[in-house]
Amino acid sequence: MKTSIATVSISGSLVEKLHACAAAGFDGVEIFEPDLIASDHSPEEIRALAERLGLSLDLYQPLRDVEGVDEATFAENLRRAAATFATARRLGISTVLVCSNVATATVDSDAHSAAQLRRLGDVAREHGVRIAFEALAWGRFVDDYRRAWRIVELADHPAVGVCLDSFHVLSRGHDPAAIEDIPGDKIFYLQLADAPALSMDVLSWSRHHRLFPGEGDFDLATFVAHVLATGYDGPLSLEVFNDTFRQTDPDRTAVHALRSLVWLHGNVTDAKPPVGFDFVELKAEDTSEVEILLDQLGFTSRGRHRTKPVTLWAAGDVRIVLNGHQARDVAPRVASVGLLVPDAAATTRRAADLMAPTAYRRTYATEQPLDGAVGPDGTEFFWVGAPPAGSAPAWVSEFENGLPPRPDHGVCAIDHVNLAVPWQTADEAVLFLTSVFGLSADAPTEFAGPTGLVRSQVMRTADGSIRLPLNVAPQVLEAAAMPQHVAFACSDVIGLARAARARGLRFLSVPDNYYDYVAGRFGVDAETVAELRELDLLYDRSADGAFVHFYTRTVGTVFFEFLQRIEGYDGYGTDNAPVRLAAQRSVTA
């Protein structure tokens, strides 16, 4: 697989983009004409820089609004094209992208467009280049790759082929199967982009909302399979117009982009998804407030690590690690998530294949090493092989002098870990969790908070054993200031709430108006509503079942949620999130 990326996909000057792409490991780049025009380096200097960096220059683009016009207009277009071809040759590029006409086309005729492309091919050949004709999804007459191929076929010119762009094909709902009718040697270039499913005009969708493979809703694997079935052996190139990527660090974005291509191509170690949570680690200089909360909620201290300032708290098989190592001035926060996987070595190889940054932890000879990777938001993910049923991972034995567990803890499992991610790394986080761990993304939701809309997207396994909701903070609010939380599944959340209250737990206060709403919306009987109100419990119901949950106060940037899923309820009480956010804000105001 030869990898390439359009310079429009990342931020910075053209020189900065080339350095970033080379450092990430791309084989080549497409030069976006506006990037060259704005550069203070000549085409020859850009060509020499690319050679020094080991990058091929694969495509010069775009040449717009050429075919489907009257003769006088086309004569001017040929002059303009000749200048573009000359620039491409100065760059050492042999393929130029020609987009289907959007603005000036007046003749809706395949034969007419083919004749003009044939003449354009003659000029291209004089300059030693070839042209790749692409059907834009918003082309005035040519907006379907199948029609673009018919025109190229009619042109019957060795310097005229097609460019296939996944966005232009899939955004219009065109069936990509007919790609296999195109000879591979007539597909001159392949551009790839993912995108979320949105209802909006296709031009705005394309210009602002493209994503790297694995981050959106397009079936790119099938699309690429159709292209490769033709015998196409050119670059797999990314062309992603996205407002976020044009604002973020180019070095990081380039690595992110290459990871998406590696994942899409499938040239990585196969690893099965995690089968459950191993632990959640909270880091803080002072963990005493968290310890009080855990004690009130039925957890017990299972001991201190024999070499580190780390303690383990547990309720049954649910484990919370409190880490005070190198945590000066750190308020409690979620530092890492431990996962149980079928094959730890395979997961480690897969993470390396996908260039996931390694998470390092100091271990001694008598301690179990934990392999890990750092997520885009800085959260560390560690994994170990799932132990036999009824036993704990080996690392648990490194904690000594703990208390016996409470028999009536009522906590069954870690249900989900909610992570607050910065807006600029949200898409990268989706790809990281999809590619490295094989999680799938639920459709995103939005809910109103006191400081703006919060976007949430759940990454999960099919069976729900791993759920990682990613909450994207409004841009006016730093993600670091947005609380994260760990949610625990309970067999009897009302009983656990009563026991915790008896131990002195202060719940997050819920306003009376909420309970009037619950009674009216769901028709909940007065006795149940009174019990919910008494314990500051929240309620939700769907066609599949019901959901009862409560929240603790926030310590640092962490709070806990305890929940009970009744029957087949599979949601998260999303409609209750604005109530929770408002209550948390009132506490800190």
Image (cartoon, rainbow, N blue to C red):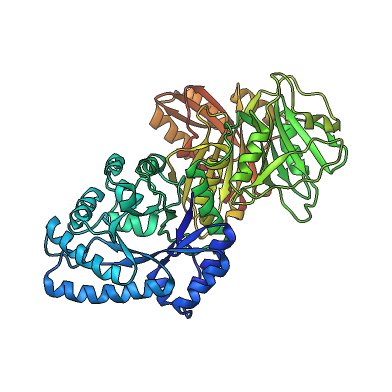
Q: Is residue 23 left or right of residue 120?
A: right
| Observer-nearest of 309 and 235 | 235
**How far across and down, in percent of the image, does residue 206 sit?**
34, 56
Q: Residue at x 53, y 32 (%)?
A: 461
Would residue 278 be seen by someone viewing this image from the given angle?
no
| Observer-nearest of 251 and 495 | 251
**How far across and down, in percent of the image, does residue 420 sit?**
57, 48
Q: Is residue 427 left or right of residue 357?
A: left
Would residue 168 be seen by someone viewing this image from the given angle?
yes
Q: Residue at x 22, y 55 (%)?
A: 152
**How far across and down, in percent of the image, does residue 479 sit?**
57, 54
**How far across and down, in percent of the image, does residue 149 sit?**
24, 51
Q: Is residue 469 above or below residue 408?
A: below
User: Based on the displayed image, in which of its 4 quarters is residue 62 positioned?
Assistant: bottom left
Identify the image quadrant of the C terminus.
bottom right
| Observer-nearest of 548 and 202 | 202
Q: Is residue 557 above or below residue 107?
A: above
The number of discs equals 0
Q: Is residue 293 left or right of residue 43?
A: right
